[in-house]
Amino acid sequence: MRSQQTVAGIDIGGDRKGNHLVILRGSEIVCNLRKDAPEQMLEKCIEFEVAAVGIDAPCLWRVGEAGRQAEKELAQRRVFSFATPTRELAMASKSGFYGWMFNGERVYQAFAPHFPLFKNGGEIGDRVCFETFPHAITSALLRTEVASAKRKRTQRREILEDAGIEATSLRSIDEVDAALCALTANFLLEGSIVAYGDELGGFIVVPVPTGHRRL
């Protein structure tokens, strides 16, 4: 990784699993928090002078009947995700499934005043936060294999190790995913990303695929 700025990634979970934060400086994991409130995670990011934060949750709800453009574009590349509903539909759901999306909303609300949400084509200031997606990250960075849900624990750790990140301290797939989001923040600062989506539905940021990256 060329960027030596400090970056962070947050894996969003439901109320039981909670959120996980990993902060990277270069390839070194300098902070790893589990199940802390969004405000505490924000404090850590400010304390460590984080420049970019990747978040594994929708940055915006769907508007109207059409799905989010970012999710459609990824699906066209055979990278599938949970469809984000309108906020009203999520609120009306009795299943509790969308609890993690509401937790993601709270994280964005806490971070946005200090880490403005990424807008494709806009100038990135001293700080930025953005939406990303570990399965899409894995699909972009695998060299020869196809991203597999069954092999995600192995494949995702291998990607971190290929980037020079010592992943043995990451005890769960949630922490691994948070580290992948942080790794993508490095790619964003290097300008080596693809942004799927539009202003209305928000952008999902993914590293430029390995085979298309300039060395």
Image (spheres, rainbow, N blue to C red):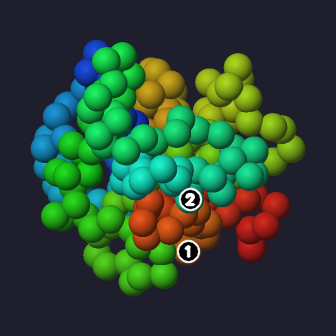
Q: In which quarter of the image is residue 152?
A: top right
Q: Please determine whether, in this image, residue 127 is positioned above or below residue 180.
A: below
- Is residue 193 placed above or below 82 in the rendered structure? below
How many residues crowd around disc 1 within 10 Å: few (fewer than 14), some, or many (20 or more)?
A: few
Determine whether, in the image, residue 96 is placed left or right of residue 201: left
Disc with the residue nearer the chain's start (1 vs 2): 2
Residue 175 on image: x %, y %? 43, 31
Give the image location of residue 113, x and y in percent.
16, 64
> Which residue occupies 54% across, 63% down?
197
Q: In the rendered image, which quarter contains the C terminus?
A: bottom right
Task: Name, please, the residue furthest toward the front.
Answer: 65
Pointer 2: residues within 10 angstroms few (<14), some, or many (20+)? some
Q: Are marks 1 and 2 in contact (CB under 8 Å)?
A: no
Disc 1 marks which residue?
191
The one of 154 and 29 positioned closer to us in this rendering: 154
In the rendered view, does 160 fall on the left or right side of 215? Answer: left
Q: Circle 2 — which element?
A: helix
Residue 8 can be seen in this image: yes
- The three-letter code of the residue at mark 2 reads Gln
Secondary structure under tag 1 reads loop
Q: Position of residue 54 (x, y in %)?
A: 41, 53
What residue is drawn where x is 40% and y is 36%?
Answer: 11
Amino acid on which the number 1 mark rests in the picture: Gly
Residue 179 appears anywhere in the view:
no
Residue identifier under label 2 = 69
Picture mark count: 2
Residue 22 spot, x, y in % from top left: 37, 41
**Which image quarter holds the N terminus?**
bottom right
Q: Residue at x 45, y 21 (%)?
A: 171
